[in-house]
Amino acid sequence: MMQKLKLANERAAAAEGKVTEVTDKLVAAQSEAADAKGRVAAAESMATEAKDQAAATTAQMRWGAVQVALLDWCLRAKASTAKRSSSAYSAMVVAKWSPSEIRLGGVRVDVPGVAALEAAVVRHRDLLPAMSQCVQAGELPAKAAALAGKEFPRPERPTATTNGVCTQELVEALFKAVSSVVSEKVGDKAGGNWAREKEVTCDHHTGHGIIQIVSRADHAHIRHPHTQHDVVHMDINVEDKPEWADAMDDGVTQALAAAATRLLYAMKMQDPQLGNAKGINRAAYGAVTDGFTLVIVKVWIDAAGADAPKLRCDVSPPQPLWPAGIMEVAYASRSDANKPVFGGEPAVVLPEAAAAAAATAADDAPMVVPQGLLVLAAMMLAKRDDLGTPPCIPRTGLSFYTPPPAGLDVALSGNWTSLLEVDTGSWPLLGAGSFSDVFDVTAAGSRAVLKAIRHPKPGDCLLTEAKALLKLRDDAPAAPVPRVVGAAWMPPDKTLLVALVLQDVGVTLPAAVRALGDDKLVRFAFVVGVMCVVLEALKAAHTASMAHGDVRAPNVIVARDGRMVLSDWGCAHLRSARYEARRRDVWGCASLLAEANDAPHSSLFAAVEKLRSAHADAIPALDGFYVSALPFHVPGTANVSTAAAGGTGGAAGAAAAAADSGAGAGGAAGTGGAAAEEDSGAAGAGGAGAGGAAGAAAAAVGGGAGAGGAAGASSPELFMRDVAALKAALHALRATGDGMVAAKAAAAAAPS
């Protein structure tokens, strides 16, 4: 029995061993299967990655081909004067390898701004009749008729003998007239400046160096002036030749090149897809004219195709700019094959309701609005981004960081460590300065402005601004200046600061004043309040041994909630600022008073005189302010008195002239002021001169208080005393202005 039990145990152990062996084999098989599955997944991942890379490479090659085509169009403009053996305005022969296409003459270009024009015609019923007057009345149509009747070669450029009857002058006069009408009737939406011979530039890097591409336009409508890249609303090229087809051919080529340069610049600043996330328009518009006919040129990137993006240029049919009589004379001497053919589908079609609304304002006079004028008006009313890619574009691929705490060196990128979330969506352009562009962004969930430097270099103005603002953050937390919330450094080594993110968001002082309307008293009180805030910002900076260096109205920002800050510290003196720089700061603050008269370029004396004549109750406070401001006048800056030279400024003119020419010598200001007063024949006591009481008060400055002008520059105590006096005078002026506004409001509310 024991033997059998032993044998059974042995068999059970053997079976258990086999089970264990089988289990181990099963586990090994499962492990192998898992490894195989992992290898398959890895292989699939590698295949997907390779496929994505191949797709990205293909897409990049396709977009690269578009960029090459743009470059080709830019460079071909240099040979635009060469004779072309092709049909009317052929623009150029396109290389077969280039993914580009030019569609000529029969294309109805989608002119932006048509909806805005329709709404404007209904809302402002006198818009079309006023536009009609541009080409039917006055000297403009007479000049057009005179130019139309001239034999070729017609004068294209103005000379002493043309008397305005030349193609360039006619085009500029007509476009300015239409712009003025639209701006006057509709508002500032069509506002802007007309400029001649504007250049568009773009640097293209090749294996042999850098090619600078330069495209020129005869005229440009500029919404935002810019020292390097004007935000051009519309380019116009003028070509007037005996062969109309040749004229259009050359003009279209130049317009195409300018538009292609803008798009090429955009591609170089953005990713190969031109930054879909940024909402950048892949189009640029221009116009060509011989003074009588208008042709619209649109260069755009068509990315809707399934195969690859395509570069296109659409050229509209010709549109007349003048009534039929002038148009007939302009082309009377040409054969049918050498003149524009009108009558095709119009570029702008106004609905019957809009046309009827405008017709009711035309009285009984016949109203003629040529199609070319409608096109111009529509383009002037279009949103800037609808007309093309603005050349001020932020860089992509940036990482943003919050500023370092107090005590750490701002100039070291390694001290900016905490990431800042900045929305990568649309960044509308707010404005452009001498060195940077400003965009509207969202940072950490709040609105902010992004200030991007255009050409970063070590120690540039953006780093200076960051240092100044962060120093004020640490030394004077309550100072009315922008708050630095973040910055971006140039990748990959992060040695150059390329962007600052700032709060608060608002509008410039000139824009805020315009928004107040025509109430001169309200504007006066508002500007004086702004000056008080600016003086506080300067006091904080001067206490920290800094100076702003560029106190001007465009550098004062007014937020929506009414808060005001002194911005743009890129020219700041960061340490041990000289008293002359501080005096310039304070004088710049005092000169802001000119904004109350909407005359930013007038002298302080002229601003005070104009306000004295408009607000008699404020004369004592204005005189006190003017006397307190004179010690800060720096010789060589804008003259405090424009009237002194003519002898009409009374004693104020005399004292101001002395301050400008030699008050820096201290006591000399007194004798200089007295002599000038005697020469001008003004009564020191008085109101005989245009200076009035301000003149008498300013005369006293020449003899006594004027010593603070230069002497104060060498003495901290005297400088601070003069600042305190100006602050007291400015607050007294503010109280006077606010009281006058309150009294006016109370009188308006009182029952009659």
Image: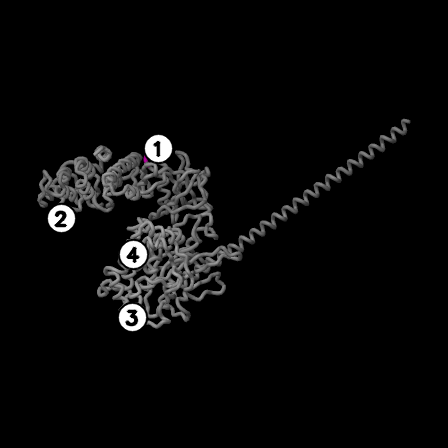
Q: Are marks 3 and 2 in contact (CB under 8 Å)?
A: no
Label 4 belongs to which residue? 131
Can the viewer see residue 354 in this picture?
A: yes
Real-space Cα separation, disc 1 to disc 4, in angstroms: 54 Å
Label 2 belongs to which residue? 646
Instruction: Say which amino acid is labelled 2.
Output: Gly
Label 3 belongs to which residue? 152
In the rendered view, would you say 406 is above or below 309? above
Location of residue 151 (image quadrant): bottom left
Q: Front-most of 323 and 432?
A: 323
Label 1 belongs to which residue? 477
The mark that comes first in sequence, 1 or 3, is 3
The image shows residue 461 at horizontal and vertical percentages of: 35, 44
Q: Which residues are magenta?
A: 474-480
In the rendered view, would you say 476 is above or below 198? above
Q: Residue at x 21, y 45 (%)?
A: 603
Taking the image as shown, residue 531 lies to the left or right of residue 76, namely: left
Q: Nearer the viewer, mark 3 or mark 2?
A: 3
Location of residue 556 (image quadrant): top left
Q: Quadrant of the N terminus?
A: top right
Real-space Cα separation, disc 3 to disc 2, in angstroms: 50 Å
Query: Is 478 a magenta residue?
Result: yes
- For label 1, count other residues whose C-alpha is less than 10 Å away and answer few (under 14), some (14-19) or many (20+): some
Instruction: Say which amino acid is labelled 1.
Output: Pro
The mark that comes first in sequence, 4 or 3, is 4
Can the viewer see residue 229 in this picture?
A: no
Instruction: Say which amino acid is labelled 3.
Output: Phe
Real-space Cα separation, disc 2 to disc 4, in angstroms: 42 Å
Q: Secondary structure at mark 1?
A: loop
Query: Is 609 a magenta residue?
Result: no
In the rendered view, would you say 361 is above or below 502? below
Q: Are marks 4 and 3 in contact (CB under 8 Å)?
A: no
